[in-house]
Image (spheres, helix red, strand yellow):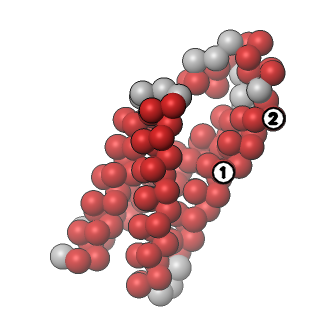
Amino acid sequence: MMILSTILVAFVALEHVYILALEMFLWTSPRARKAFGTTSQFAEETKSLAANQGLYNGFLAAGLIWGLLHPNAAFSFQLQLFFLICVAVAAVYGSITAKKSILFVQGFPAFAAIIAVLAAHFI
């Protein structure tokens, strides 16, 4: 179960690094506009807001990576669980306020990773 939880946490971290890249560096590109359902004009007008949002996604990824790499198993578990819960809460909020698909794209992997991390720690 430890291997599965590590894979899932790493996946969530990588997903948030990808979101960071889309929001901070590629926001006005066709790829990002398609992913977020924005127009060219809206993307240009909201570049700085998106970059700020991307930075926060980077912090989530950094926290998850920290949790994966920390040598103390108990603290590693706490870090992973904390940052996964942050991702899950953000996904629920985003699905309510922005786009329903956020719950599936970001929430589902986070919830799966939470279950795997808990199972690896307690089973």
Label 2 Cα neighbours within 10 Å, binned few <14 / some 14-19 / many ≥20: some
Label 1 Cα neighbours within 10 Å, binned few <14 / some 14-19 / many ≥20: some
Q: Looking at the image, is mark 2 or mark 1 earlier in the sequence?
A: 2
Where is 6 relative to 13, above or below? below
Q: CA distance from mark 2 to mark 1?
A: 13 Å
Provide residue 122's location: percent of width, then percent of height: 23, 77
Could one spot residue 25 in this view of the protein? Answer: no
Which residue: 56% across, 24% down?
35
Q: Mark 2 highlights which residue? A: 48
Left/right placement of residue 23 relative to residue 116 reads right
Which residue: 50% across, 62% down?
83
Answer yes or no: do the residues labelled 2 and 1 have beta carbons within 8 Å?
Answer: no
Where is 117 relative to 100, above or below? below
Could one spot residue 95 in this view of the protein? Answer: yes
Check disc 1 and give the amino acid type: Tyr
Provide residue 40's location: percent of width, then percent of height: 74, 13
Between residues 81 and 8, which one lies in front from this camera angle?
81
Check disc 2 and give the amino acid type: Ser
Which residue: 64% across, 25% down?
32
Q: Mark 1 highlights which residue? A: 56
Left/right placement of residue 92 relative to residue 42 reads left
Query: Which quarter of the image is occupied by the C terminus?
Result: bottom left
Which residue: 81% across, 21% down?
45
Q: Secondary structure at mark 2?
A: helix
Between residues 42 and 121, which one lies in front from this camera angle?
42
